[in-house]
Amino acid sequence: MTVSNLEKYREDLKALLQEGRVVLQALIYESEGPEKWRDRKAGVGWTAEKIEIYEDKLKPFRICYHHWYSEALVVVKQLLPDRYADFVKFYERPKTRKSFDVETYRIEDACQSLSSTRYDGNVIVDMSSAVSLLQQQIAILESVEKRFESSLFDIKQLVQADLFDSELEVATELLKNKFSRAAGAVAGVVLEGHMKQVCDNHNLPKKSGTIAVLNDALKAAGVIEMPQFRQIQYLGDIRNKCGHKNPTDPTVEEVSELIAGVDKVIKTIF
């Protein structure tokens, strides 16, 4: 029995939240120092054994944060786009920053262990200033989890993802049975349908439903970058080869590339 995409996403989100809390501990550990961190944990009832086990699992903050941020950013962009800018703001340094203090400190600074002190040696700002910023990022991600549980949550895209996965399975089966054109046509329909949905997600007008036009619209709006644009362009060329009469049939390798490429697009572009 397969787990639905909705359930899989819920489980992945819970794991991502748990990872975020571990990343937060790594930040606190580095900003406070090992001794103070251990004392504080002991003060809330942690045993020496538990502290040692947990401490051994902590990775350098700048490494584990970037891994977590990359995944969390995609989730927020897809499922809570109205908080996407806030999520990014807590990480990125202000482009017009003229001072370096608590108000302008960002997680990006903490990843580089940046700090500032006064002439008398008192700290103006250091990694500890990023703790509240990371806590707010985690809070945004927690609101995504609540949306999953809400009866108002629009599951259209998740249901559509299930359908697209099923259709790509059909395309793969057709290719195995040497129906290359049919397999490519099915994969092309999936690609076109997903790109229409992405345009809807970003409120982009669709002059037509062709892959080329949709691809141009997404590139012009900055939703996709040049490498993604060129990859979709290539997939569209293979799809057209499958859907129109040509002197030569599309090769098995080309259609296999098309199916794999479409699978990547529907899982990485939202």
Image: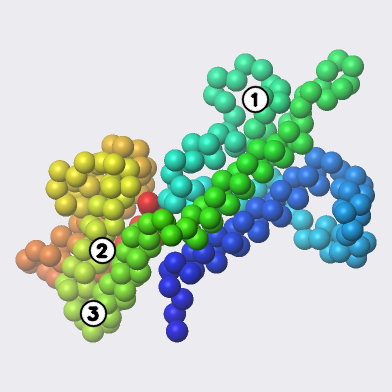
From the viewer's side, name the closer residue of 57 and 45: 45
| Label 1 residue SS | loop
Sequence-wise, which precedes: disc 2 or disc 3? 3
Residue 210 location, x and y as percent? 16, 52
* 65 sits left or right of 118 in the view: left
- Measure the C-alpha gap from mark 3 to mark 1: 56 Å
- Measure the C-alpha gap from mark 2 to mark 1: 44 Å
Give the residue displayed 84% in from the left and 41% down from the top.
Answer: 32
For disc 3, the marked residue is 174
- Measure the C-alpha gap from mark 2 to mark 3: 15 Å
From the viewer's side, name the closer residue of 255 and 247: 255
Residue 26 image label: none
| Label 2 residue SS | helix
Amino acid identity at mark 1: Thr
Give the residue displayed 77% in from the left and 60% down from the top.
Answer: 57
Sequence-wise, which precedes: disc 2 or disc 1? 1
Residue 50 location, x and y as percent? 86, 64
For disc 2, the marked residue is 190
* 206 sits left or right of 39 in the view: left
> Around disc 3, counting alpha carbons within 10 Å, would you say few (fewer than 14), some (14 to 19), or many (20 or more)?
some
Residue 60, compared with residue 128, is above or below; it is below
Residue 108, compared with residue 5, is above or below; it is above
Q: In the rendered image, is residue 258 in sight?
A: yes
For disc 1, the marked residue is 104
Q: How is the image coloured?
A: rainbow
Query: Is the C-beta separation of discs 2 and 1 under 8 Å?
Result: no
Q: In the rendered image, is residue 74 in sight?
A: no
Sequence-wise, which precedes: disc 3 or disc 1? 1
Query: Is the C-beta separation of discs 2 and 3 under 8 Å?
Result: no
Amino acid identity at mark 2: Val
Residue 34 location, x and y as percent? 88, 48
